[in-house]
Amino acid sequence: MKIASYGKPRFIASINIATDQKKVIDVPAGNYAGFLLYAAGTNDTSDDYTFADNANNAILRLNNNDLVNLPMGFLADFTNLEHGATGNASATAGAFSQAAIIPCMAKGHLNSIHVRSNDVCLLTLDFGTIADIASGLCEVYALEADHPNVYMPRFYDIAVSIKAGKTKERIQSPNVIQLYGSTASTGLDNVQVEQDQRVIFNASDGAAIVLANIDNQVETALAYFNAVFADNSLQEGLGSKIEISLDGNTADTTTLYVFAFDSDLGRYRDSLAIVDAQLDRKALLSTQSGGEETVSVVKTVPSRSRMGFLRD
């Protein structure tokens, strides 16, 4: 499955993470496919800072509604799993670098969030145990998109207590299009996912890891399963009911990561008008410079796709 581009980086903040454990960033108006965190610095004596071991949650909130609320450690793994190695590293008492994408679109999709000038859009970053850091900065980039706000993402996690035997968990959100789960739990034996009472995923924890890593073509195995529903379309996820069955051999805890969506037709239309204006401007500039053939290409880029469930 082709991975959609996250677009053009726009620098919005630099945070001294040796002193600022928690930071709230005002996101400016624009169309964004996601956000990039890049932290680098020097560890304190005997320490090695990582997003996985030290940081807490990153929360993207638009007008008091959480769009993404996930641990930075998972977001770093998600970035590695879905998009490629970030080069994250940390040496005891030496240098560290950590990176993660905060996504506004599911794998294989073209989507953005459209932030209006009168919106309150906040990105809250909790870097956790910063005592491990001698010095360091985190650069934050908004990733500007050339495609419209087709849906509003809802990406969050659920802690599930498993037991010896079968544990069932019903996902309460409608419109689920992707599901991830940690298979690092030693008490987990098998994972089954049902969509509308139809089994779409059934594998042992070991096989689930292999499938996720093969599907995403990662070079270093990560302990997650990844259930992508059918053709990964919005229509497939619309209104779907998802139930997870976890077979365990002992009492333990695991985590599910749910990517769902809501629609906002007004925001979609506003963002589409901006994207269309950008494309028209590109076409005009191309025509003025003598590149008539380019115009037809620009006019048919994927950003014009409505993805099927929104209508003019």
Image (cartoon, rainbow, N blue to C red):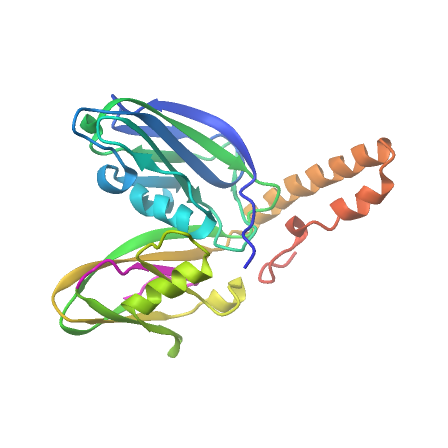
Residue 139, relative to residue 157: is it above or below?
above
Q: Position of residue 303 (x, y in %)?
A: 64, 49
Residue 162, relative to residue 72: is it above or below?
below
Q: Position of residue 274 (x, y in %)?
A: 64, 39
Question: Does the magenta-highlighted stretch encompass residue 306?
Answer: no
Question: Does the magenta-highlighted stretch encompass residue 179?
Answer: yes
> Which image quarter: residue 22?
top left
Instruction: Determine if residue 62 is in view.
Output: no
In magenta, the rendered stretch is: 170-186
Residue at 73% from the left image edge and 51% from the top image edge: 300
Residue at 40% from the left image edge and 59% from the top image edge: 213
Instruction: Determine if residue 85 is in view.
Output: yes
Residue 312, relative to residue 5: is it above or below?
below
Looking at the rendered image, the quarter that the C terminus falls into is: bottom right
Q: Count the marks: how many?
A: 0
Given residues 286 and 3, the one toward you in this image is 3
Q: Position of residue 127 (x, y in %)?
A: 27, 33
Left or right, 249 with respect to 37, comes to: left
Given residues 148 and 2, the one toward you in this image is 2
Given residues 211 and 2, the one toward you in this image is 211
Left or right, 94 with respect to 141, comes to: left
Looking at the rendered image, the quarter that the N terminus falls into is: bottom right
> Which image quarter: residue 240?
bottom left
Q: Position of residue 154 (x, y in %)?
A: 40, 52
Residue at 53% from the left image edge and 42% from the top image edge: 6
Residue 163, relative to residue 292: is it above or below?
below
